[in-house]
Amino acid sequence: MTGFLFELTFWLAAPVWLLLILAPGARLTDRVAASPLTVVPVLTVYLALALPVAPELWAAVSSPDVDGFRELTALADGAGAIWAQVIAWDLLLGQWMYREARRLGISAWAMGPLLVLTILLSPIGLLLFLPLRAIRTAGARGTGAGTSPGTGPGTGPGTGTGTGTGTGTGTGAQPAAAAPGTGI
């Protein structure tokens, strides 16, 4: 049963990843990417795997050391629970990266490979995305586009009308255009 749940974990997340990578900008993709509920099925599997090893899991996280984690991951359910947790956090991270890229006007052609890398090696995907995000944020700040996280017209001085997410003040959030010659 543990082997099945281990495999199921990825397949529960795969449809969301496919939307983020293959259908960027689609209304369904944007709605799915905005929901934290995408991880609930994966976390359900996590609970099914974690409960049988709850004492070992608690020992590993309440007093972390490498030997405690080695003992936990030596158990099939322990390794499966850690895997499910990684899949859930990677998915949330990928959704955040997708939404930030959309907000900043980063090309889907640039984000597709970054999201695939995030599925496989999320720390590396994130480490490559963060400088790209910083460059786009700084560029948008310099032009007055794409920096206000407002949900509609900006409330501060300025001229933009914007369609960003969240709340805030400023000149209005408009996705920044691709940097000349970069395609991103």
Image (tube, grey):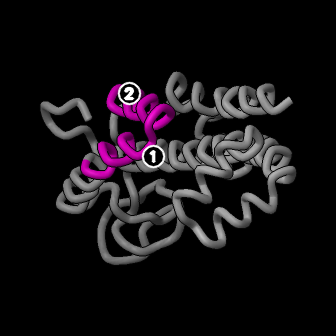
Residue shown at the point (61%, 59%) measured from the top left: 68
Instruction: Report the amino acid beneath label 2.
Output: Pro
x and y percentages locating residue 39 in the rendered image? 71, 46
Secondary structure mainly formed by the magenta segment: helix
x and y percentages locating residue 98 in the rendered image? 48, 42
Q: Nearer the viewer, residue 118 or 57?
A: 57
Q: Secondary structure at mark 1?
A: helix
Q: Secondary structure at mark 2?
A: helix
Circle 2 Cα neighbour tier, 10 Å, few/some/many (<14 / 14–19 / ≥20): few
User: In this rendering, is residue 52 above or below 170?
Assistant: above
Instruction: Report the amino acid beneath label 1.
Output: Met
User: In this rendering, is residue 10 above or below 149?
Assistant: above
| Residue 119 appears anywhere in the view | yes
Residue shown at the point (38%, 27%) measured from the top left: 113
52 in the magenta segment: no
Q: Earlier in the sequence, mark 2 or mark 1?
A: 1
Which region of the structure is painted magenta? Answer: 109-131
Q: Is residue 120 left or right of residue 104?
A: right
Label placed on residue 113: 2
The residue pinned by badge 1 equals 97
